Image (tube, rainbow, N blue to C red):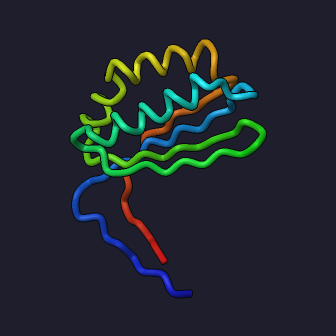
Amino acid sequence: MNQSLVVIMEKEYAVIFKTKRQLPMPDAYIEMSHHLVERVSKLPGFLKIDSVADTEGRGISVSYWSSLEAIKKWKEEPLHLEAQKKGHSEWYLDYTVEICEILKSYRK
């Protein structure tokens, strides 16, 4: 097995967002997702995001951050607040948010 250990020098955090979406996904959901990615990519402290979804409405997004303060600012971002309200009332049957500190990272 050829893995390399990447030692994290600065603290990094991951926000894991697991969802079960209403199907079919409304166009407004897809449009909002594009706007959110565009907006979050410009925020200080945001590092990257990885997302996957299946055809049954389950999805997971993991965003990476340089600080807990940056995560807090994203949570309070007006566009994100709007998306949270719609997600709670219209788009998601269920969701979970977990915030984790990354201690080590392995890559191939």
Between 62 and 12, the one nearer to me in the picture: 62
Which residue is pictured at 30% across the width and 44% down the height?
46
Question: Would you place residue 98 above or below residue 88 in this image?
Answer: below
Question: Would you place residue 18 above or below residue 22 in this image?
Answer: below
Which residue is pictured at 61% across the width and 29% down the height?
95
Residue at the farthest bottom position: 1
Q: Is residue 51 left or right of residue 81?
A: right
Residue 79: horizontal and vertical position, in percent? 38, 21
Which residue is pictured at 69% across the width and 23% down the height?
93
Q: Which image quarter: residue 15?
A: top left
Q: Which image quarter: residue 25?
A: top right
Q: Which image quarter: residue 9?
A: bottom left
Residue 56: horizontal and vertical position, in percent? 78, 39
Question: Would you place residue 67 above or below residue 22 in this image?
Answer: below
Residue 32: horizontal and vertical position, in percent? 49, 27
Number of on-image labels: 0
Question: Would you place residue 105 above or below residue 71 in this image?
Answer: below
Residue 57: horizontal and vertical position, in percent? 72, 36
Say which quadrant the N terminus sits in.
Answer: bottom right
